[in-house]
């Protein structure tokens, strides 16, 4: 095996990934449907989208779907989920996909900043299988780490790699902030790192520093979509429960849709 750091070395790399975009929508009165963590559950995502389309039939004009991140790992078809998100959204809808910590870790592995072992601990076996890769065989291979890395990169389409790289980390509107994990209560939003926005876990009762806006997020599975201290968690653990949820936000009100 060659010396030096590989994408499957135990320690990974200290190189930081490029910063992700942070989006702002001004004066947007469209209905917004925020969808929680999908985690490879393509069938649930399709079913939920059908429910969203039916719910929106009586609403004129365009609508917006905001995906809150964590499309890969744990569930059976991560590759299929990314393929689906690369397709056009339902007719009459726009779609913004945010980055979750699982997309960041997958990208970090593919680009040499993290180890396969670290990714494996968060459910990479299901993702690799969805790309036609036997993850157990990868770990047993005695060939060089560079060759193993090439096997994985060759199985992941360039379009998927570009998708992972281009995901923004945050979306702000006049009344809401959409982010995968949440915001720290003691740090201005602009000063919070991408990794924190994708990985943070706060106690449900901890207040935010945004008294004028609601934070809509996923990342931490909950039994049902709920609001506490102006935080709304939409992650109902689809890969564990089979229940994928969305929150419709429109004209000051909210409605929960689930599979």
Image: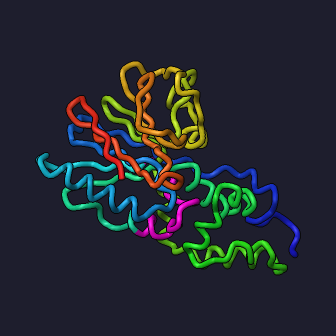
Asked whether residue 141 is in view, the answer is yes
Is 256 contained in the magenta span?
A: no
Q: Magenta segment range?
A: 68-83
Residue 200: quadrant of the picture: top right
Residue 108 at what x, y percent from top left? 65, 58
Colour scheme in use? rainbow
Residue at image location 51% in from the left, 35% down from the top: 182
Is 81 contained in the magenta span?
A: yes
Residue 105: quadrant of the picture: bottom right
Q: Is residue 136 shown left or right of residue 78? A: right
Residue 97 at what x, y percent from top left? 41, 53
Residue 162 at what x, y percent from top left? 49, 65
When the figure is inspected, residue 56 is found, relative to residue 9, above or below; the finding is above
When the figure is inspected, residue 84 is found, relative to residue 171, above or below; the finding is below
Residue at image location 76% in from the left, 57% down from the top: 12
When the figure is inspected, residue 117 is found, relative to residue 172, above or below; the finding is below
């Amino acid at each position: 095996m060659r010396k030096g750091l590989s994408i499957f070395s135990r320690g990974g790399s200290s190189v930081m990934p490029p910063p992700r975009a942070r989006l702002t929508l001004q004066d947007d009165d469209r209905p917004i449907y925020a969808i929680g963590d999908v985690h490879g559950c393509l069938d649930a995502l399709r079913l939920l989208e059908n429910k969203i389309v039916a719910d929106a039939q009586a609403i004129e004009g365009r609508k917006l779907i905001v995906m809150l991140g964590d499309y890969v790992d744990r569930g059976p078809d991560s590759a299929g989920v990314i393929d689906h998100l690369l397709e056009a959204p339902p007719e009459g809808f726009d779609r913004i996909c945010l980055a979750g910590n699982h997309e960041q870790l997958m990208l970090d592995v593919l680009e040499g900043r993290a180890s396969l072992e670290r990714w494996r601990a968060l459910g990479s076996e299901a993702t690799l299988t969805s790309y036609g890769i036997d993850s157990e065989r990868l770990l047993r291979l005695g060939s060089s780490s560079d060759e193993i890395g090439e096997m994985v990169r060759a199985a992941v389409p360039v379009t998927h790699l570009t998708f992972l790289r281009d995901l923004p980390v945050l979306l702000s509107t006049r009344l809401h902030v959409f982010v995968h994990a949440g915001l720290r209560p003691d740090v201005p939003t602009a000063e919070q790192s991408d990794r924190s926005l994708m990985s943070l876990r706060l106690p449900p009762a901890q207040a935010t520093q945004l008294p004028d806006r609601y934070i809509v997020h996923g990342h931490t599975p909950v039994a049902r979509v709920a609001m506490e201290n102006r935080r709304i968690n939409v992650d109902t653990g689809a890969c564990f429960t089979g229940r994928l949820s969305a929150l419709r936000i429109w004209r000051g009100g909210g409605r929960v849709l689930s599979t």
